[in-house]
Image: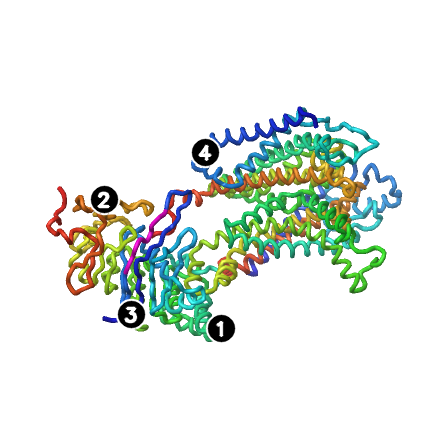
Amino acid sequence: MTEPLLRVRDLKTYFVTEHGSGTARAVDGVTFDVLPGETLGIVGESGCGKTVTSLSILRLIPEPPGHILPGSFIEFEGRNLLTLDPRELRAIRGNRIAMIFQEPMTSLNPVFTVGDQIAEAAIVHHQVSRRAARSRAIEMLRLVGIPDPDERVDHYPHQMSGGMRQRVMIAMALVCRPQLLIADEPTTALDVTIQAQILELIDRLQAELGMAVLLITHDLGIVAGSADRVVVMYAGQVVEQAPTATLFARPLHPYTEGLLASVPRLDAPPARARGRLRSIPGQVPAATAWPEGCRFHPRCPYAWDRCRAEEPPLLDAGGEPGTHAVRCWLLTDPRRRTPHP
Amino acid sequence: MNVGNWLALGGAAIVALAAVAALRRRITATASGRRFFRHPTAVPGLFVLAFFVTIAIAAPVVAPYPPYFQIDITNPDLPPSTQFLLGTDPYSRDVWSRLVYGARVSLGIGAVAMLVAATIGTAVGAVAGYFRRWVDTALMRLVDVGLAMPRIFVLLMAVALWEHIALWVLVLLIGLTGWFGTSRLVRAEVLSLRERDFVVAARAAGAGSVLLEAGLSFLGLGVPPPAPSWGNMIADGWHKMTVAWWASTFPGLAISLVVMAFNALGDALRDALDPRRAGEEGGEGGGAA
Amino acid sequence: MATWLVRRLAASIAIVFAVVTITFFVIHAAPGSPFLPAESQHLTPETLRRLSTEFGLDRSLPEQYLLFLRNVVRGNLGQSFALRRPVADALADAIPNTFTLALAALIIDFALGLALGIYQAVRAGRVGDVVSGNGALLVNSMPVFWLGLVLLLVFGQWLRWAPVGGLSNPVLCPRLDSPACGLDFLWHLTLPALTLGLVGAASTARYQRAAMLEVIRQDFVRTARAKGLRERRVLLVHALRNALLPVITLFGLAFPFLFTGAVLVETVFAWPGMGRLAVNAIFQRDYPVVTGAALLTSAMVVLGNLIADVLYAVADPRIRVRSETA
């Protein structure tokens, strides 16, 4: 087995809420690996902690109110990111690990040209001259498929469409040829046709540059097309983890089942209202008060006494060892997999 | 200061506290009211204003001397003592007593001028925002002109041309020259419905009026002496600042405190009415998405 | 950009024109003839006749208005009664002093205000922010002339660190014709400039803090951090460039404040500028000087706003590009 590029172990990121209503346990003991060159998808509804997980890797969580608990461990290329001093951390940010965000409209600085913003990372990390950085920026713009890059390099973000801006974000992230790209809902804010183009672009660049991608999304459809493996998150925890094909063919966690049932299919009428998963009843609980026992039990059609009392660990679901894990008591008692009347 | 004055002063502080507490009970029923009182400067600001308003109303019992009373004209400029809390001025008048009566004049001018400015500003802004087209254009060009003429120069011109102006005319003039900014914001508000900008504008009009009165009176062109406005008091003590610093320092401090309270309340009110901050209250900590 | 600038310039001229017109009619609405106030008996009949012809007091109102306009355009603002010289000359003597004072105050205002505002925003909610924030609010609430008096008392009288007023030492430096006298002038400038500058800085800091806090929580600041930039560069380049945009508006607002404040501060510090000239003129009922000063000040304010608009357009590419294509 190859050595993982990124190793996340028992990551806990909590937020102290204002006015003393308690601590929001946004990410509560998350563990996963990213292998070199692969695409790992992290899926879940909004509020499940997937964005906080991605921000925690580069320590971009605003502190306060947030903080990563001691005992958490994030290892990248053999070094623990959580104990690096600021200078060492900066040498990784934007250089070895780069990130693109959900909102291309607000994630670019409105007062600098896109060329300057792309070139900046190259200047900071690779100590290239302004001139060289500028031609790197033009080259990156061409790489991400922006027409007339020589002209576009001097444009400001507001002169570009949403899809173009996301391409610029990608160019900016990849200018230093990172080993890992974290893409947090990269297409959510875009039109459907543009979405497909951006995903295709990420796939192509991943193949060309040989980097790993951590793809964070609420959309299983995107995962199905791009990811090698999938981590499903619910209520700050990993609830299921499997190779993409396995997950779609044999979802074991009731929450994954629900998610899959809500993906629109050609052979069935669309079941998903925008942003809301219709087939799973109820809502994600507040991060300040996760339910006792299994955190999914209030919404689970199979829940029984044990689920309400005892929190399940990640259990191995068989198949090739260590590939498919599920946080559900059903694995110990498969006969209960019949919905309550 | 006799025992009665001290008791009255203590009483005024208690009344002011009670007023703040009563207001707090009233207002915290609403979400924006709670936000207002959570602001760290809201309570001190309210208290300072309530306190000055109370002593202004209760001036005859809080002040040991009448405001014009010259205690001993052969022996002026006495330093602060238990008898003369803030000393006496170059005309041998008790500074504390004049400060207390001066609160009536200065706060009154601030309040009336703010009222005039807010009324006219709101009316003009609403008309401009409602009718649009040429009415809007004409009124807003007028506002441009009004904003281009510094208020103090307009007032100086008026005073220079009309020789002696009555106090009420002065107050009216201060109000009449202070509405331009308000109207511009109200117009924007009619177009986009934002009450917080109005708060900002009203605060500026009120605080600006108190400061403007002080400036004009300091130049000898404001409230006619010997009426005890705070600006007049600074002007009276100015030339003997080196021997009797207290006569000018304390009224200036009073102005600063009141204007600061006003600004602090404005800040708290603006933040309380800010819809974006309103959204923060219900949200969970952190951007868990 | 050029057409936009021309339009903006035309609007500015229109505003100054309106101010001139209002000034003219205010003078005519005042009791008595504008150039024959009750107290000016010291004017010789000859001067009065000359003034009458010069300003055409014997003609009809529209004619007088046109004459007045023509005179203003030519820089003829009339004759000062008290100073017995043209108003324009008296103003020309005073303007450099006021301008120097305003410029020095402006530098203190923005240098101190921006630094403090950025510091407060970066340390938001901590002790340093709360203490300096309340301090700024207090200074911002002070009557500017009173702050001048207090500074004068403390630094001029008690500590004797600074002179108590005037432009320069009247005995040693009656004229500014040596480097030593230049220093003497700067030394005299310190307290008045500090007075105006501190009050301005308090207000600038409050705006700057709010603007910075607004910007710091925006997405592109996180993007800048994710790029691996130093925190200094994130705050002082990426955040600050955006936070400066609203402050440019403040630059336009600083002009009225500086000129209004100068009237009072010049009186306190016996600084022979436009403000003191105007105030003295009022006491002598010398209103050609008062109206001249008002006119000039309005022109300065309009100019300040114009400069702020141009700066804003230069600093914000969204506006710059729009006006280029327009």
Q: Can you tell which mark lies on residue A298?
A: 2
**Three-letter code for the amino acid on which mark 2 is drawn:** Pro
What is the chain letter for disc 1? A
Would you say residue A94 sits in the magenta stretch? no
**Three-letter code for the amino acid on which mark 4 is drawn:** Thr
**Which residue bears the numbered disc 3?**
A36
User: Which residue is more in the foreground, A82 or A295?
Assistant: A82
| Callout 2: SS | helix
Q: Are marks 2 and 1 in contact (CB under 8 Å)?
A: no
Residue at screen point 83% across, 59% down: C173
Which part of the image, by quadrant, shows the N terminus of chain A?
A: bottom left
> How far from the left and from the top, in percent, is residue A107?
41, 59
> How far from the left and from the top, in percent, is residue C222?
42, 59
Alpha-carbon span between mark 1 and mark 3: 31 Å
Main SS category, magenta section:
strand
Alpha-carbon span between mark 4 and mark 2: 35 Å
> Image quarter for residue C170?
bottom right
**Three-letter code for the amino acid on which mark 1 is drawn:** Arg
What is the chain letter for disc 4? B
Labels 4 and 2 share a subunit? no
| Callout 1: SS | helix
**Marks 2 and 1, the one that precedes in the sequence:** 1
Q: Can you tell which mark lies on residue B28?
A: 4
In the image, which residues are magenta? A23-31
**Which residue bears the numbered disc 1?**
A130
Q: Inspect this view and state whether residue C68 appears.
A: no
